Amino acid sequence: MKKISIAIVLMLTSTFVQCQSTSASEVKTGSGVVRGVREGEVQFFKGIPYAAPPVGEYRWRPPQPVTKWTGVREATKDCADCPQRAWPGTTPNQSEDCLFLNVWAPSTATSKSKLPVMFWIHGGGFVGGSGSGPGAAGHAFVKQGVILVTINYRLGRLGHFAFPALSNEHPDEFKGSYAYMDQIAALKWVKENIAAFGGDPGNVTIFGFSAGGVSVHSLLSIPAAKGLFHKAIGESSGGRDGVLTGRPVKKNNADPLYPVSAETIGINFARRHKIESTDAAGLAKLRSLSLDQIIDGGQESDSTGARTYAGPILDGKLVVETSETAYKAGRQPKVPLMIGNCSAEVGGGFINTATTKEALFSLFGDLEAEAKAAFDPDGKKEFAEVQTRIITDWVWGEPARMTARAFVANGAPAYLFHFGYVPPAARERARYGAGHGSDIPFEFNTLNARWGAPAEATPEEKELARIMNTYWTNFAKTGNPNGKNVPVWPPYNIQKEEILDIDLDGKVSSMPDPRKARLNVIEKAVQKRERIQARGV
């Protein structure tokens, strides 16, 4: 009996400890009370609605207010992702009712804590991705004194769409890029509610990767987003015109980089589904299409090659200009900026039309000799490596430098980084450097959630993740990534052009940008193209 009693005591003690380490946490928002999960020093809330379901008549309408609820809403599980193509081997949980966000905060936070807030915008080319999942968990940020918010936003044709009847409907509403409207609605939710979780609505940092980074640029130049954030981080985010930066709505405003208007693409998509009319009746039929028909297996053109997906839209009211145009005119807000990219990214443009080094360099025209000297000085590099370097610099590296220069010229601090670490086991596959998104698990310090990575990170990787997560949280706190126990990261200036470099082995150091000659020739090529386009040639 004595042994049995001891066993019962031990079992009850274990249960009590488990209840202490994982328990419920309730917070009152403007729409009602949410119940999350408390795990030790971290509490998190998942699936909080920041807008009403964009369904039925609200498909292709700006986000609508949330209907308030009574009682307590459970916020303990990931919500549905926004509709997108299902990839092989995945079991998607998707719904058009997807405008939710997640919050991670310290368990001890109160409405008086006033902690800095980081607002994550996921990548995925505006056609995929999610604000949920272990790779975007906020535990490491919280342990460094920062609240993390991650969001879903509408994707694909639900996120960016134009159609003649839609342009005429509700003339007082924004049109086109509903994804950006969602992001702004989520930022407004943060402004109104984050104090209840312990956050400071006056200290919000937006940060995003790939399409999320393009979104950061867009939010920096969209008037409706003004005042909703105070710092910005762009990760593999581009910055120049042409990379998901805004397609004109009408034919008569066609851009040389986007020769087909967004409305024409909307008509192409309607015709794919035998919808010929472009009036209100045609729009009603489009709104009655199933999600599978809208997603269309991820196809962005029909069998004839006509485009059926527009991407971000330059509508003139919500998105009034491209980020590059705003930066050149100094119209961006004077907020601190961190920006950078990985060493072997993806992308393209005209560069992908070349199949040999000779053809690739010939695309530079009278800059051909300078391009060869910068990218292949001894003439011995493989075509694939040269192509990777040029694509990376053209789409991501040089635009990041252009953006940093614009912010500095406008009186705001900027910090430029270049991430090149590749795990030793992956170096045979990733021969030319760190691929698109390789830096994200280090910034979040979620190394065990890396795709295709070993189950356990090495001590060196853990230290690199600590350093990078510290840079990100320091920046969110003060607008400066520097602080204790991290290498010095000098602010970017046009004279010294120093960057933070993370090399192949994970060594972190500051130095004059070693890509200078490469980025210079890319810059000249871009400027040459812009001059030609301006002349209408």
Image (spheres, helix red, strand yellow):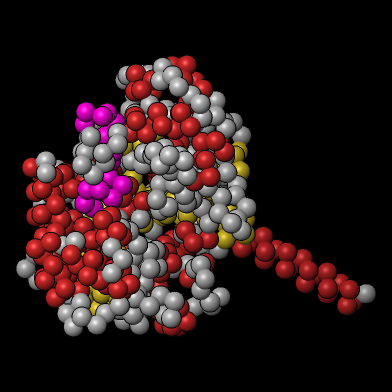
The C terminus is located in which quarter?
A: top left
* Residue 103, x across and y down, in percent: 47, 50
Q: Is the residue 36 above or below the residue 343 in the image? A: above
* Residue 271, x across and y down, in percent: 46, 28
Q: Is the residue 271 above or below the residue 124 in the image? A: above
Q: How many marks?
A: 0
- Of residue 83 and residue 298, the one placed in the foreground of this image is 298
Q: Residue 360's quadrant in the figure?
A: bottom left
Residue visible at 53% across and 57% down? Answer: 133
Q: Is the residue 458 above or below the residue 417 in the image? A: below
Q: Main secondary structure of the magenta part?
A: loop
- Of residue 198 and residue 427, the one placed in the foreground of this image is 427
Residue visible at 23% across and 44% down? Answer: 257
Residue that lies at the very extreme toward the right in this rendered image: 1
Q: Which residues are magenta?
A: 238-253
The N terminus is located in which quarter?
A: bottom right
Judge from the rendering whether residue 368 lies leftward or rightward of residue 244; answer left or right. Answer: left
Q: Residue 383's quadrant in the figure?
A: bottom left
Is residue 227 found inside the magenta-colored segment of the image? Answer: no
* Residue 122, x across and y down, in percent: 42, 52
Residue 67 seen in the figure = no
Judge from the rendering whether residue 364 lies leftward or rightward of residue 172; answer left or right. Answer: left
Residue visible at 73% across and 64% down? Answer: 15
Residue 61 seen in the figure = yes
Q: Is the residue 58 above or below the residue 484 in the image? A: above
* Residue 98, x across and y down, in percent: 52, 40
- Of residue 297 and residue 222, the one placed in the foreground of this image is 297
Residue visible at 53% across and 77% down? Answer: 454
